[in-house]
Amino acid sequence: MAKGTIQVHTENIFPIIKKWLYSDKDIFIRELVSNGCDAIAKLKKLVGVGEAQVEDNPQYAVTVTVDKENKTLTFSDNGIGMTAEEVEKYITQVAFSGAEEFLSKYKDDNTIIGHFGLGFYSAFMVADKVEIHTLSCQPDAKPAFWSCEGGTDYELTEGTRTQRGSDVILHISDDNEDMLNFYTVESVLHKYCSFLPTNIYCIDANAAKEETAAEDETTEETSKEPTPINDPNPLWLKQPSECTDEEYIDFYHKVFFDFTPPLFWIHLNVDYPFHLKGILYFPKLKHEMDSSTGQIKLYNNQVFVADNIKEVIPEYLMLLKGVIDCPDLPLNVSRSFLQNDGYVRKVSEHITKKVADKLTSMFKTDRPSYEKYWDDISPFIKFGCMKDEKFYDRIGSSILYKTTDETYVTLEEYLDKAKEQHENKVYYVSDPKQQAQYVSMFQENGLQAVILPHVLDTHFISFAEYKNNTVKFERIDAGLADSLKNDSVEQSEELIQLFKDALKDDQLHIELTSLKNESVPAIVTLDEQSRRMEEMSKMFGGPMVASGPVQKTLTLNMANPAVRALAGCADKELADLTCHYIYDIATLAQTPLSAEQMTEFVSRTGQILNKLFQ
């Protein structure tokens, strides 16, 4: 048996960093700005415990200077700074994290962002050479200068910096000159650093030089103080009781550039068993399951990590918009992806619970508002229930159904109201306009149906039947004949045979009833289960799963004069045309005719008119 030691060749580390360490090239800006914020946070901590002194009212800041002329990006901070020994310790030892060491000494400090030790080396993703000018806050400290050109060799000498803090200067490589565009850098800063706890400034060095030259030619000063690109105190850090509706809405507009007001929101503020803050907004959906609507931004100590991280935010919550800041989340080296562990699942479950609690609370305490929002939030709730049974267990009793008379009821309320007319059956409408005739007949007979118009509802009614196994859902064009059936109507085999001979459809079942509305000659009803199977099959583009075509029933209305007269019609051709015509208009009340069917329908209409007025 052989034993040995794995050899790590340090000369290979920079190619790995440049190509594979980080998922996005622009991430180096986030890492270096975060390091600057950490340097300031450390200094504040030392000042707070009496281990360092600073000037009165220091204006802490991190400044990013873009110098296209000299091909450099400079990241400056006035934080804790470093001695030469600290540079040797923290910079030259890859993956040795100064943040971790600081946190081990000051365990109650949760303001430190970096944890990984590799953040600084992200600079070599875009730079041929990196320099550090730094001066420690320690009394009598000497400035230090460090320089490296992307290999294992570096230079460390006494520096020239005269003020506390650090400058990290990146000499940008030729193939990364896009990072010398001021607006590109500013955009990246807005993306990652909009809510960092220290003021962040972005300066165009070349524009500043031109402005200074212009001022020298005039006697009047025109320069303005730069404004920070970030908000160090984002709304989610405040207590919910301190925030107004106007602030919530303004924050929503600013972060998501969506100027349609949100329906409502949930402010998360958790300190135990983990730290979690954030705001989740329920947007007004433009259309059902609008995939572009949802955007939940994940932050770690106010540093943007990524959008829509599925490990933290369940898929069905992606329809929401919001920000989540959880400094305790275990991130990998690039802060771009979450390690999948039990802690992350607990955070995800807590977020889900808070959303469910908000909805059920609104249902119980402010039902009018809940009903007002229902049409917009129902796709989200139904999708969530089908994806997560725990979510359904919390929210199931708060699911509403909009009825054809424009009221909102729970399943229990609907069944309780309809129990005398149809036991444990829920009649529904999938297209209120197309099925308007059925709705009208239902209402004429004192019956009520619910409106389930979305593609998602095809799946949801099967799920609802599974969760309530004594309940059956039937579309109104499946259950109408049964609900309005009149057993006292005398069956005319002659009339039934007349329609069978005319329509020549062996699969079509024909029966007779008597409806209150005499103007309706017939209705077509479909078998609920076979129709569902066919629709599901079409939805997924596969072959029909059912064992045959959808079973149709043509129910003739014996209260209609034309239907009654057909049995004794002596004109065989007119009777045949009328049978087809009645079947067509009954079908039209349920679904549009195909182009071929419509052509035949128009032709038959003309023939009937000619027969009547010859």
Image: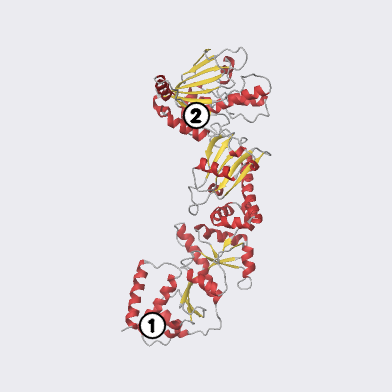
> Going from the N terminus, do you reach mark 2 or mark 1 first?
2
Location of residue 81 with respect to 589 vertically, above or below: above
Count of number-bearing discs: 2
Q: Residue at left 56%, top 46%?
A: 281
Residue 220 found in image quarter: top left
Q: Which residue is mark 2?
A: 29
Identify the residue at image location x=56%, y=39%. 298
Q: Is 384 above or below relative to 61? A: below
Quadrant occupied by the N terminus: top right
Comparing 219 with 502, the one in front is 219
Considering the image in quadrants, where does the C terminus appear? bottom left
User: Are there few (<14), some (14-19), or many (20+) residues within 10 Å of tag 1?
Assistant: many
Please state the horizontal and vertical placement of residue 319, each as a whole percent of the image.
Answer: 53, 48
Amino acid type of disc 2? Ile
Asked whether the residues under the numbered discs 2 and 1 touch, taking CB atoms below 8 Å apart as contact, a structural biologist would say no
Q: Amino acid at mark 1?
A: Ala
Mark 2 or 1: the one toward you: 2
Judged from the image, the secondary structure of the residue bearing numbered disc 1 is: helix
Q: Does the rendering let one see residue 25?
A: no
Find the distance from the CA under tag 2 to the CA under tag 1.
81 Å
Above or below 386: residue 321: above
Relative to 133, is 420 on the left or the right?
A: right
Q: Is residue 532 above or below residue 169?
A: below
Task: Return the x and y of residue 210 as percentages of the image width and height.
Answer: 40, 23
Q: Position of residue 305 (x, y in %)?
A: 54, 36
Kindly identify which residue carries mark 1: 575
User: Label 2's element?
Assistant: helix
Residue 55: mark: none
